[in-house]
């Protein structure tokens, strides 16, 4: 299921954006007393949780594609950390979503405040996870085809420098 692994980057970025935007909608909905923003926050989080599940599934497939090539390296250690934090993010977002459903039914401003605090904590962990994933790609080249090397080889073989 290589194609699932290749879907990880777009799905994970979509999931990150949805989770962050959902908490921001809820924050401004509470501050501005706008139910429309709170409703947008609620539904954005629900879709975000589904996207996080997709990111989790495609992330495991992406790991399968690269793990043999990097086994025993520093990149592999970082990949294991990324996997562990990803497992935590999945659980945290699902719990946050369940709590948001509970808050939605109770309409209690204190519960909404607790939800927002938890939401901003989850966003922080999502940011950490994104940083780890970014380092895997941009520092270690995990999952990246060596485009620049191929282009340089083509140039050198044609006499171009």
Image (cartoon, helix red, strand yellow):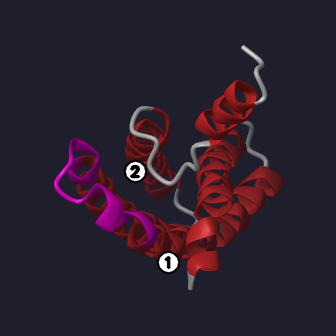
- Residue 96's disc is none
Q: Which residues are magenta?
A: 65-77
Q: Nearer the viewer, residue 63 or 88?
A: 63
Q: Nearer the viewer, residue 79 or 94?
A: 79
Q: Position of residue 48 (x, y in %)?
A: 63, 65
Q: Residue at x 21, y 48 (%)?
A: 73
Looking at the image, is 78 positioned above or below residue 44? above
- Residue extending farthest to the left is 72
Looking at the image, is 14 positioned above or below residue 5? above
Left/right of residue 75 with respect to residue 90 in the rendered view: left
Q: Position of residue 7 (x, y in %)?
A: 65, 68
The answer to which quarter of the image holds residue 35 is: bottom right
Q: Quadrant of the C terminus?
A: top right
State how far apart marks 2 and 1 are (Cα).
Answer: 24 Å
Where disc 2 sits, the SS reads helix
- Residue extending farthest to the bottom is 1
Q: Residue at x 72, y 35 (%)?
A: 154
Task: Please give the residue where the numbered disc 2 appears in the rendered image.
Answer: 118
Q: Position of residue 141 (x, y in %)?
A: 46, 42
Q: Position of residue 116 (x, y in %)?
A: 49, 47
Left/right of residue 76 with respect to residue 92 in the rendered view: left
Task: Please give the residue where the numbered disc 1 appears in the rendered image.
Answer: 57
- Residue extending farthest to the top is 161
Q: Is residue 106 visible?
A: no
Q: Quadrant of the N terminus?
A: bottom right
Give the number of the mark in front: 2 or 1: 1
């Amino acid at each position: 299921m290589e194609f699932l692994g290749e879907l990880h980057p777009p799905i994970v970025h979509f999931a990150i954006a949805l989770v962050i935007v959902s908490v921001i909608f809820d924050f401004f909905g509470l501050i501005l007393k706008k139910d429309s923003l709170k409703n947008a926050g609620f539904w954005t989080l629900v879709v975000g949780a589904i996207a996080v599940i997709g990111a989790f599934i495609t992330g495991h497939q992406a790991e399968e594609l690269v793990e043999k090539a990097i086994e025993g390296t520093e990149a592999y250690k970082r990949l294991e950390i990324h996997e562990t934090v990803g497992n935590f993010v999945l659980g945290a977002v699902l719990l946050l979503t369940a709590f948001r459903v509970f808050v939605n039914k109770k309409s209690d401003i204190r519960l909404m405040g607790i939800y927002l605090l938890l939401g901003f904590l989850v966003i922080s962990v999502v940011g950490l996870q994104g940083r780890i994933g970014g380092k895997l790609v941009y520092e270690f080249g995990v999952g990246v085809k060596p485009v620049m090397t191929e282009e340089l080889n083509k140039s050198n073989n044609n006499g171009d420098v």
